[in-house]
Amino acid sequence: MMCRMPVVDCAHYADGCRQHGETLSLAEAEERWQDDDGKGFVWIGFADPSQEELAEAQARFGLHELAVEDARQMHQRPKIEDYGDGNFFVVLKTARYDDAAEVVEFGEVHIFVGPSYVVVVRHGDANDLRGVRQRLESRPDLAGFGTTAVVWAILDKIVDDYEPVVEGIENDIEEVEQAVFERREDQTQRIYFLRREMTGFFRAVHPLLTPLEQLERGTLLSEMDAELRSFYRDVGDHVRRMHEEVLMQRDLLDAVLQANIGVIGVRQNEVVRKVSGWAAIGIVPTLIGTVYGMNFENMPELGWHLGYPMALLLMVACSFALWAFLRRAKWL
């Protein structure tokens, strides 16, 4: 049985560089946090921690109790909450698209940020944030901006990973659109499933617009360095582009759904026309047979020895003429 390791990594950074190479324990991280006199910060990463582990982090680093309550479970709305004195709490949704199942898998990342600490809590496996720490460590000029640089690196990775989700959904929409207009089997269920996944993805992207705009304008985290703010502006541009694409895809899916309903209606009309056409053909010999089945005495052709074959010929001729007419009208 694999041992559970909720602490993915824990390290102390100063002047944009990782101090020592080992992974620190929470007690060692607290000691470094208290002794660095604002010269660096501690970065701790959790993966699906227990309530006890979160409580320990809260006790050691003074995490806000309301933020800790939110971080204990998933299904939080993406947001950035400012608790003052350089402390804020960030909730981000991660996403990964399973093209085979046409399902968007979601996870969440909760980030506790203070002037000298960053505690990252990851829920779910939709994005393991692999490479974020290494990327920032390779850029001491960015890591030197402190904890807000860590938030940028995580946010940038999550937003970049939205791109394959958008592409996957777009490919599936094109497949559905092609299937609808090629009149394959009914696509209604598939369209509704895609619409549901897009709604979930929209809820991951849309709430980020407002806080990112506030960061760009400086109304949120006004003390952030102008150079680092430009990196947040770049992420904001990506989020806005993703948001526009999601809206366009949602509108396209609605149009495809209406087209699918229209195709189903046309297909049903074709079936009704065919049934009606064959019914009309069948009723002609029925009417003729009904007339001759009335047993009237004054029907001259009843005594004619060619009356019977002439009646049959009349039935066939009328039926064939009606069939030819309906065939030309494309009812059959």
Image (cartoon, rainbow, N blue to C red):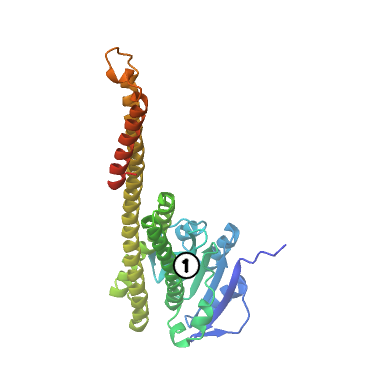
In the rendered picture of this protein, how many numbered marks are placed on residues?
Answer: 1
Q: Nearer the viewer, residue 82 or 314?
A: 314
For image coordinates 57% across by 57% down, the residue present is 51
**What kind of residue is marked 1?**
Phe
280 or 159, which is in the foreground? Answer: 280
The image shows residue 218 at horizontal and vertical percentages of 30, 74
Q: Position of residue 299 (x, y in %)?
A: 28, 17
The image shows residue 215, relative to residue 108, as above or below, that is below
Decide if residue 248 is on the left or right side of residue 55: left
Q: Quadrant of residue 76?
A: bottom left
Q: Residue furthest top?
A: 297
The location of residue 196, given as percent across then percent down, is 41, 53
| Vertical order, 328 against 244 (above or below) | above
13 shown above or below 75: below
Q: Quadrant of residue 10?
A: bottom right
Give the position of the N terminus as an image quadrant: bottom right
Q: Would residue 34 be seen by someone viewing this image from the given angle?
A: no
Circle 1 residue? 112
Determine the residue located farthest toward the right in the rendered image.
Answer: 1
Residue at 42% across, 68% down: 167
In the picture, the quarter occupied by the C terminus is: top left
Q: Nearer the viewer, residue 255 or 281?
A: 281
Front residue (pair 194, 47): 194
Name the secondary structure under disc 1: strand
Residue 126 in view of the camera: yes
Where does the image place residue 97, in percent across and percent down from the top left? 48, 64
* Residue lying at the far front of the rendered structure: 305
Q: Residues within 10 Å of mark 1 (few under 14, many from 20)?
A: many
